[in-house]
Amino acid sequence: MRDRLQTRYQVQAQLRRPIKERPAHEKSQRETTLLLPTLRTLKKLPNFYLSIVNMVGPIASLSQLNRADGSASYKCPATGYSILGAVNAPIELPARRDALKPEEATVEVFVKPGTTTAGVGERHVEGILRSVLGKIVLGREKGFPRRGVVLTLAIVGGENVERGDSANLSQYLTILPALLHAGLLAMVSASVPLSMTFSATLLGVTKSGDIVRDLSPTAAKAAVSLHVFAVSSKNHLLLNESEGRFDFDTWELVRERALSVCQGETAASADGDVTMGEGTASASLNGFIRETVEDQVYSDYAFKLDSI
Amino acid sequence: MSAPLVLLPSDEVPQDHLPTNNSNPLRLGPGLRILSQPSSKGSSHVLTATQAGLLTTDAKRNTVSLLSFPNRRYIPTVNDFVIAQIHHSSVDFFHCMVTPHTAHALLGQLSFEGASKKTRPMLKQGELVYARVQSVGVGAGAEVELTCVNPATGKADGGLGPLTGGMVFDVSTGMAARLIRASSSSAEHTDAIEGLVVLSELGKKLESLGGFEIAVGRNGKVWVDCSNAAESAVKVTVAVGRCLQETDQQNLHPHDQKKLVTKILRDMKLVS
């Protein structure tokens, strides 16, 4: 057990994800000596450092808020967005909001922008989130029918989402994967029964026809088409939001790429220019979700695991 | 036990992790469900997780369950011991608060040991009771009912009843569950399994001062009383509460729990 945890922490440190501090007496000498050279090389070679930063995966942690039933924070360095999500479930809904489907739980989603009040763009993205999450929440489990699952997502970092024109919607495509991940992790943290987990990715097609992953909002404006895919842990395609000009062949290519990004399958290696790290399970987005949850379970049950 | 296994929703429970005791039917705990998969030769059954958590099995009782994230809001479950505060009383019931911002739970005026129409406890607003959850009702908006007596024996088993004196401290629900598990099995080594040495350490150090008494409610409340320790009673109560809260908040290792106890008792000048 201890060995497994240690390797996990080392890998995390190299990916520059937060290292959870363990009591000092547990920290072995070996671990510190292994970490030091990596940090030193990083200081010496700024270019190498930059390439690491570009490759860096998202950062997430669970159960940060005390008063919510479940919460998660999610930060995507590539797009710069940082989301804080909180779930309260099951809670009693006021009035008759349960009347539409009395045998199931009602999933409600609220998206709060950092600087302004919610507007049309937020309503649009709330609808997308509600339909995706509503599909995977098992609303008929004990204690859930006629009650509510309320998810609140606050955009706490990243560029302001522009308002007022049609650019609004494409802006929301760039933030959608981060919102989906934060929402899912918060649901998991609140122990809401789910039929499956999923991961989502944003892919853009540039003018030269390249498929680019995790575009920044400025890069997204220059892209010809934008696509958001959510793929479940069982390989179902849960969500497809596409925007811009594209044909079926492009869409098919983008879909394959999305599957490989989310699932970590080596299917895309046929074209030869697969980006590094996508082939292994831990670098896939579903693998990332799994690792985040495992880390939290291991730290919550450290007292139980230490005695094994 | 094999290596710890963390499951996510939709993960299947591997066959080799199931207990192999065939005398009883396998019982599923929360977070797991059985699905049947149609296949060529009839249908096969698989156990899948619906929550994320640590898979645990009990070979003796032939159960398999999923330990989910422990520090959630408390949701009343039948037979849980809770510490409730009286909000107001009506003709038949005391209306109690078990968790903040939820509907009141009902505690019958006569559900105390030896209570009758003439002799029943007159509890005032704000007083505390140690009670057992009797029923949670069905569906949304159902009332939670509490009792301070075992209906089968008419006795107040396990210290049920009004809590007088002392002080209540808030801990996380996960910590409360750990404290209950650690104390329910009296064997000394169980304390180490739950990773809790703070209480036994406090007990050893404070024995000379007359010891202390605690009651743990699953709703994340710990009641501490120390009526024996004459003038240092308040100090001992606060020290015990602080030790429990800091162990909980910082998720301390047994080794650090002992250090914490020594430090806090010295800070409060209880032991030299």
Image (tube, grey):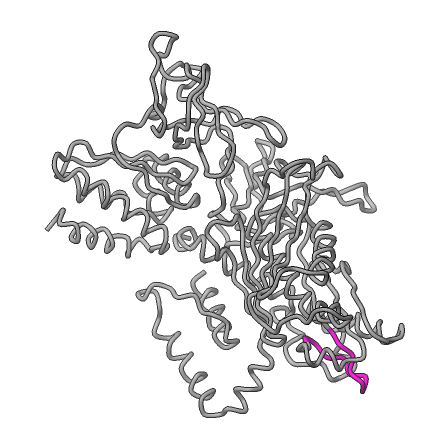
Query: Image point 37% across, 12% down: which residue?
Result: B115
Which quadrant would residue A214 be assigned to in this image? bottom right
Kindly tell me whether residue A207 is visible in this rendering. Answer: yes
Q: Which residues are magenta?
A: A203-214
Image spot of residue A51 (x, y percent): 58, 86
The single residue placed furthest to the right in the displayed view is A248
Which quadrant would residue B241 be assigned to in this image? top left
Image spot of residue B48 (x, y percent): 65, 47
Quadrant in which the N terminus of chain A appears:
bottom left
Kindly tell me whether residue A259 is visible in this rendering. Answer: no
Image spot of residue A132 (x, y percent): 73, 55
Where B11 sits versus A34, above or below?
A: above
Q: Does residue A121 appear left or right of residue A209 in this picture? A: left
Q: Does residue B109 appear left or right of residue B76 in this picture? A: left
Where B89 sits versus B271, above or below?
A: above
Question: Would residue A212 be counted in the magenta stretch?
Answer: yes
Query: Image point 39% across, 32% down: which residue?
Result: B83
